[in-house]
Image: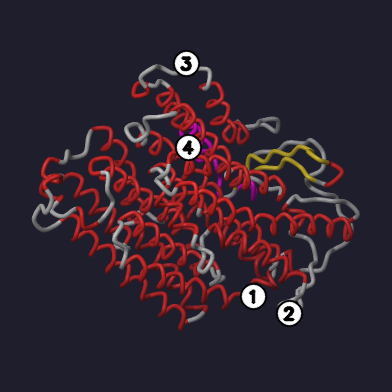
Amino acid sequence: MFGFDSHWLSILVFFPLVWALIGLLIPSPADQRYSPFKLWALAGSLLTFLFSVFLYLHFSSQGEEFQWMERASWIPSLGISYVIGIDGISLWLMLLTTFLMPITVLGSFNAIEQRQKEYYFLLLALETGMLGAFVSLDLFLFYVFWEAMLIPMYFLVGIWGGKDRIYAAMKFFIFTMAGSLLMLVAIFYLAYQHKVQTGTYSTFILDLYHLHIPGEGYLGAQSLLFLAFAVAFAIKVPLFPLHTWLPDAHVQAPTAGSVILAAVLLKMGGYGFLRIAFPLFPAAVSLFQVPFMVLGAIAIVYGALVATIQPDVKKLVAYSSVSHMGYVVLGLFSLNQIGVSGSIYQMLNHGISTGALFLLVGMIYERRHTREIAAFGGITKVMPLFAVVFMIVTLSSVALPGTNGFVGEFLILLGAWGANRTLTVVAALGVVLGAVYMLWMFQRVMFGPVQHAENEKLQDLSLREIIVLLPLVVAIFVMGIFPNYFFEKMDPAIQRFLNRSSTGLASQPNPGPQTSYAQGNSHGSS
């Protein structure tokens, strides 16, 4: 079905951007409430999701390592190529992105009244950037998509955000850009090392996995290169103490910006560790394993403690992301199959649960124009359907057995126990603290008497809002009850990742000159 000349993955990546550019030709009506562009954006995001499902159904976990690969020379003098493909890890992150985008677009229908064409254009352009980063197999191409994501998100926060939106957008941009520059330097150093060892430049990741990079001590070349990538990825995760941009960006961003930022963009950091930093620098990973596990454990407890004292429900959810993503780092650096599997699953879980939380917060904000916890109380009496959905998502966030959150956190703690028991005990405190801040928030917002007259006439969920939330609620239970369905496709990719991150190709001496896989204009797929 898929020939060597197919470009299925490229079509998936660039379709949202092309669709958005065509949509710019749609004339804007005088009344922005009836702008046809939001329907155009919804149709484009739905088509992208359906196409990603088509690719998923034809993905074989027992097939080639990277499927639907496309290769074309881009900048031959520097060994830079356009190379894309997906494995069992990037497959699920790709699906998470395309699954959430139509939900996010539909959830914005009543929230955005001005400059709708520009808003939805930026959302679709952002989708192309995210998909491109997840499927890139050339480090320079990955960097291009990584930076391209900054631009739409910067404008989404800076134009449609809250009163401090410019400060938040600039802080987000500067933090990410600073880390990216270190990554760019490291990429060109690796290309140069490939030239030294093989005679040709290359930034194709499967070529670079074969490099022999000295790894002696904390100041060795491998350690410094690892840190150059790790800082960029840690900022994106975000890992304590590089997390300070996140609460500002979340609080000031429009609801769609918060959903995409939490559900997808933060996963870029974890994915970067998986695809690039660990396999390329296994000696450095072993050297920095405990320090990063310490930072992960600190992030779990710190994020939970700070979330507990937040008066703003959106800021509480933002700090919960710091805590939940700390589990991801802990699981990755456990360097065993259980911990890494749990970490990847936790990235998917966090995207579903925290994305749903931000949508729910946005819905209540549209009604009351405040996010202060003290402004609510007794909401269950006037919005019973909203309360039921909020309860399900809250229980998912606190990792109740039967929901998606339980599977990820349990596997991470189990894997981390085999790597460092002391830090696992510290991290386990986050489970208790997570229940404290989430259930306490839920109790204050939902239960008790209706304390404010404005809350007595609140409307329950509309049909559109039910359609927005229903897929997320279904995903919470499907992922909680049938986790093996997800692990089947990712397990072979995880095993290859672990082989490379310990005794794999990257840790072996260079076997001598070899032909760069990324040269030429050949195409391949499954």
The residues bearing labels 2 and 1 have C-alpha atoms spaced at a distance of: 11 Å
* Secondary element type, mark 2: loop
Where's residue 450, x and y in %? Answer: 10, 52
Q: Residue at x 77, y 68 (%)?
A: 508
**Residue lying at the far bottom of the rendered structure:** 422
For the residue carrying disc 4, how many other residues have a C-alpha within 10 Å: few (<14), some (14-19), or many (20+)?
Answer: some
Q: Residue at x 35, y 19 (%)?
A: 31
Give amino acid for label 2: Gly
- Classed neighbour count for the residue bearing mark 3: other residues with Cα under 10 Å, few (<14), some (14–19), many (≥20): few
Report the residue marked by disc 3. 27
Q: Quadrant of the N terminus?
A: top right
- Work out how far the residue at label 1 is from the one at label 4, CA to CA, in angstroms: 37 Å
Relative vertical location of residue 455 with respect to residue 445 in this rendering, above or below: above
On the image, numbered disc 2 is attached to which residue?
Answer: 217
Label located before the other in sequence (4 or 3): 3
Q: Identify the mark nearer the N-term, 2 or 1.
A: 2
Q: Which mark is residue 237?
A: none
Dot in front, 3 or 1: 3
Question: Which residue type carries mark 1?
Answer: Ser
Span colored in magenta: 48-66
Label 3, label 2: how far apart the Cα atoms are: 61 Å
Identify the residue at image location x=35%, y=71%.
305
Q: Amino acid at mark 3?
A: Pro
Q: Say which label, 3 or 1, has the lower sequence index.
A: 3
Residue, far right:
199
Label 4 sits on a secondary structure element that is: helix
Q: CA distance from mark 4 to mark 3?
A: 32 Å
Query: Which secondary structure lies at badge 3?
Result: loop
In the rendered view of the protein, which quadrant contains the C terminus?
Answer: top right
According to the picture, the residue beneath numbered tag 1 turns out to be 286
